[in-house]
Amino acid sequence: MGFLSAAEERGAALERATSAHEAALAALLSAAPTPRGLASGRLPRREARSLDRTLGDLASSRAGSVRLWNRDRELVYSGGRRLDLSPADISEALGSGLRGKVDSVRVPDAGGGRSDELATVMPVRATPAGPAVGAFEVRRPWKSVAASAGFPSWGGLLPELGVLALVWLGMLGAAALAMRGRAAGPSPLTDSQLDPLTDLPNRSTFRELLDRALIAGKRGPGLVAVMLMDVDRFKEINDTLGHYNGDLLLKRVGPRLRSVLRDQDTVARLGGDEFAILLPGLPDDGAVTTAAERIIRSFEEPFVLGGLALEVEASVGVAVYPEHGNRVDVLLNRADTAMYAAKAARTGFAVYSDQQDQGSRRRLALAGELRRAINEDEIVLNFQPKTRMATGEVTGVEALARWRHPVHGTISPSEFIPIAEQTNLLHTLTERILDRALSQLREWHTRGFDLTMAVNLSMRNLLDAKLADQIAQRLRRNGIEPSYLELELTEGMLMADPRRAMEILGRLKEVGVGLSVDDFGTGYSSLAYLKDLPVDAIKIDRSFVMGMENEPRNAAIVRSTVDLGRNLGLEVVAEGVETQAAYDELARLGCDYAQGFLLARPLPAPELAGARAGARAGAGAQG
C-alpha cells in the first residue's frame, strides 16, 4: 500500500470537506417544499419577506449568499450579498441541480483564477421523490470549507448550517401557502397525484377533491363552483414559439390563477392546455360570476416568454352545484359545455345552460362525422359572383363551403370549420376545398370564363409555414396563374399575431396570389399594421352594408372604409349588397366591387354561367 503525498492528502481532505458540506446542505434543503411563485419566475411578496426575515444573519454577512433558481434558470430569490452573476457562471453545476443532483464548483474570479467561494447547487423538489423544479445556489467562503478539511466532523461548518436551517424553516412556512392550492386537506399530495409539468393536482386528483367538496356541500350552506378553462389558440402558440415556450406558458398559468383565488380554492391541470378550478363554499351566484371575471382579467397582463410579451386569452366554462348537477361527471361535462359556448361566443366565460347542452350534443355528433363527410364528398362548394361596379361585369367568384349532411341538411362553415380546427381536420379540409376550387377554376378558364377565385382561410391556416409552398404546388398542378387566386383572411386573424402574419403573407405574395382582408370593420385592426400588410383589397363587412340605408353610423363606416382603401391604394369590395339603393350609393362613393343577393346568391358551379351573363342586367333592371 502506497502513501499519498502531502498535496494529494490535502486534496483528498478538501474533497471530503466538500462532500460533507454538500451532505449537510442536502439534509437541510432537499426536502424543502416548492415555493408558490417558483414556476412563475417571481415570488409573491409575502414569501420574499418571509425569506428576508429568516435570512437575516446571512443577509448581513459580506461573505455568503443564497439564491433560488427555477427550472427555466430564472433567478427567483436572492438573499445575502448581492452578486452580479448570471446562471452561466455556474451553468454546469446549476444544470446538475435542475437534473436532481447536488454539485459544487469554485467560481472563477474576473482574472480567470479561483475565487474564495464555493458555490453549491442542490435541487428543490415539490415532493420528496419528485423531479427537480428548481435549485438552491448556496455560496460560502472557500476557507470555511477548507478549514474543516482535516476534521472528520462537520464542526467547522455548523455556523453556516445554522443559517441554512433558518432558510429551510422559512421555506416550510412559505410553501405551506402553496400546498393549500394543491389539496383540500392538510395532507400533501404525492407524485402520482400531481401533474408532472405544472406541479398542480392532476385530473384524477381533481375529481377526488370535487367529490369531497360535493359531500361537504350537502352538509352545509353555500355553492360549489366548477370551472374548466383552456388557453385560446394554444396550438398556435406551440407551433409558433415551440414546445419549450408552450410548456413554460402552461407552468405559469397555475400561479396566475392562484393569484386571484382564495386559499381554499384548488387549481388543477387536466391535460394539454385545459385547467380546472374548484371553488367551494361560495355564498351566491354573484360570487361565482365575480370569480370567473377575476380569472379572465388575470390574463390581461401579458406572459413574458423568452423576452417576448405574449398576449394570451382564455375561455372559462362554469357549472354550479346544486343547480347544474350533484355528481362529479355531470358537473365536469356541463362546465366543459359552457367553456365551448364561451369560446364560440368569445365572451371570456359562460355559465352552463340547457341551450348550450343541446348545441354541445350536436357539435359532438358532427365532430364524429366530419372526417367521413370530407372523404365522401359531402363538403361541396357554392360560388358567389363578385361584380365590378364600374361595368357591372362579373370578374370573379368567392368559393363558399357547405356541408350537405344526409340528416341535418345544409350546414354552414361557421358551424363545421371550428370543429375541423378542434379535431385536427382543418389541414385536410383546406386541401380539399383548394383542390376543388382550383379544379373548377381551370374548367371555367378552359371554357373561356376569365374569372378569379377567392378562398377563405382560417387562423390555423395562416400559421402553417408550408402554406405558401402547398398553394404554389396546387396552382402549378392545375395550370393556373397565381394572380387568379385570392386568399381572404379576417382582420382578427391578421392582428392576433401581426409579425407572424406579415411573414406568411410575404411568402404568399412571393407566390403571386392576391390577398384581401375579409369582414373589415368588425375586428380591431391597427392602421399602423394595415398600411404595411401586403394585401390587395379590403372587404366591407355585410353588417355595415346592409344597414347603411337606415343607420347613419353604418353609412359613415362604409364611406370611411372606401376612402381608406382609395388612400392606401387598395381595392374595396362591399359584401351584403341586397338593395338597388345600396348598390347605387356604393357606386357613387367609388367602391370597386360588390357581392350580395341583389346580384346573385351563392350558386353551384353549373348555375354560375347564367348568373354571370345576367348580373349586369339584374343590377340595372332594379334601378
Image (cartoon, rainbow, N blue to C red):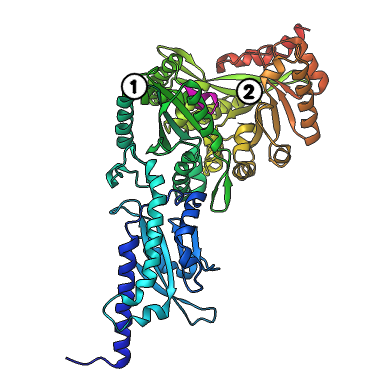
Q: Crowdedness of circle 1 by 10 Å Cα count: few (<14), some, many (20+)?
A: some
Q: Which residue is mark 1?
A: 330
In front: label 2 or label 1: 1
Q: Quadrant of residue 95?
A: bottom left
Residue 432, position as x, y percentages in the image: 48, 29
Q: Quadrant of residue 302?
A: top right
Q: Nearer the viewer, residue 114 or 590?
A: 114
Q: Quadrant of residue 487?
A: top right
What kind of element bears circle 2? strand
Magenta residues span: 343-351
Residue 48, position as x, y percentages in the image: 49, 54
Q: Which residue is mark 2?
A: 397
In the rendered structure, the answer to whether residue 388 lies left or right of residue 402 reads right
Q: Is residue 422 magenta?
A: no
Q: Is residue 348 magenta?
A: yes
Q: Nearer the viewer, residue 415 or 343?
A: 343
- The amino acid at mark 1 is Val
Q: Nearer the viewer, residue 458 or 179?
A: 179
